[in-house]
Amino acid sequence: MLSDADLRRTCGPLGSLTISETLSILEQAEAWERQGRDVCMMSVGEPDFDTPDFIKEACIRALREGRTTYTAPDGIHELRAAIIDKFAAVGISAGLDQVVVSPGGKFACAAAIGALCGPGDEVIIPTPYWVSHVQMVRAAGAKCVLVPTSAADNFELTAESLAAAISDRTRLLILCTPSNPTGTVYRRAALEMIAEAALRHNFMVLSDEVYEKLTYDAGQPHLSIAALSPEIAEHSITVNSFSKSYAMTGWRVGYSCAPSWLSRKISNLQCHFVANVTTFAQYGALAALQHGEKACQEMRESFARRRDLICGLLPQVPGTSFIRPSGAFYVLLDISSFGLSSAEFCQRLVAEARVAAAPGAGFGAEGFIRLSYACSQECICKAVQRLAEFTSTLR
């Protein structure tokens, strides 16, 4: 008979996964709120908008029409066809056998990584990274090869750093553009360099583009690596979601586009893990694609104003620096001058100044904190003022 210690021991890579650093700080902030404290919540990346009514109505209509049964593992035909049209509009040619609708962009990434990678494989991930990408690779039993980027290079991979990371075991490279946590939007030259390396060394590229519609500078538009050429499209997995662009975080609907041989594997994996995305939620997502451009644009314009506001205020915070983000809704703030770990800085910030931020260590960016400006302008102003007062006490 197993002892209690044996019964409870961590088994395999899935058992070793840890909670997101972001959620840990959120729990502390919510504890303060339950005590009646005013907390500026800048730790979690979630739009503060409600889902547009026409999307809700499409979901309600689907419920009333009895659309409550299973669907195909890769999603309803109408939604996949609309996704194909959406990809075509940005220069990616795809067929129905290449598109899989998943329960959120997060699971779309995890399913692609799980279907493609395993023990012995290496996955290149630029740092700073989105925290869950690393955990997904480890869950698949593959090895993360972390490649530092710098503010001097706009947090983009360089040809030299990428070349040094590639080996004969390289299976996949993961991009996040626009980036969580840096707000970087990868430029064409950097994407072309990555594409050339992927084709020369025969590895895949997973491009996480859930913030695709949230870019703010005319000279820095979003570009999908899969749109560069048919050749790199055959080496690409493009992941997207309805969560950020349409304020649908709780709906859990995302999707991927990959070569058909890989999409079949993703669909098979999804069939056994989750069956399918909630049926009536798929009809809400379909409405978002068909009629959501105006709502999406209005939210994007609001985020752009908030980006400009926070970037205008942050220079008054002593001892810090940042690179102006071009997309998503985050600022990565350098707090290394204070000699505190990012976790200690954030713990003290929420306890002493009632501002919740995400420690950079969770993103492979020790010495930084991530601030989300997906909150009201009032919250942004109050948070930056409190941050400035807090950092003044540390010098």
Image (spheres, rainbow, N blue to C red):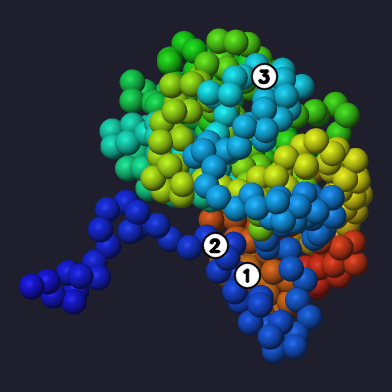
Residue 4 screen position, x and y as percent: 18, 77
Say the numbered circle drawn on residue 92: 3
Say the numbered circle drawn on residue 26: 1
Q: Is residue 65 above or below residue 394?
A: above
Residue 354 screen position, x and y as percent: 73, 77
Say which quarter of the image contains residue 257: top right
Residue at the bottom extreme, as displayed: 35
Left or right: 332 in relation to 4: right
Say which quarter of the image contains residue 48: bottom right
What kind of element bears circle 1?
helix
Quadrant of the drawing holding the C terminus:
bottom right
Q: Amino acid at mark 1?
A: Leu
Counting labels gives 3
Residue 191 screen position, x and y as percent: 64, 21
Q: Is residue 259 above or below residue 313?
A: above
Dot placed on the residue nearer the N-terminal end, 1 or 2? 2
Residue at left offset 24%, top offset 66%: 9
Dot placed on the residue nearer the N-terminal end, 3 or 2? 2
Of labels 3 and 1, the one closer to you? 3
Distance between mark 3 and mark 1 Cα atoms: 37 Å
Residue at the front extreme, as displayed: 65
Residue at left offset 73%, top offset 63%: 42
Pointer 3 with pointer 1, Cβ within 8 A: no
Task: Look at mark 2 in the image and give the residue it sits on.
Answer: 21
Say the numbered circle drawn on residue 131: none
Res. 364 in view: no
Q: Amino acid at mark 2?
A: Glu
Crowdedness near tag 1: few (<14), some (14–19) or many (≥20) residues, C-alpha within 10 Å? many
Distance between mark 1 and mark 2 Cα atoms: 9 Å
Crowdedness near tag 3: few (<14), some (14–19) or many (≥20) residues, C-alpha within 10 Å? many
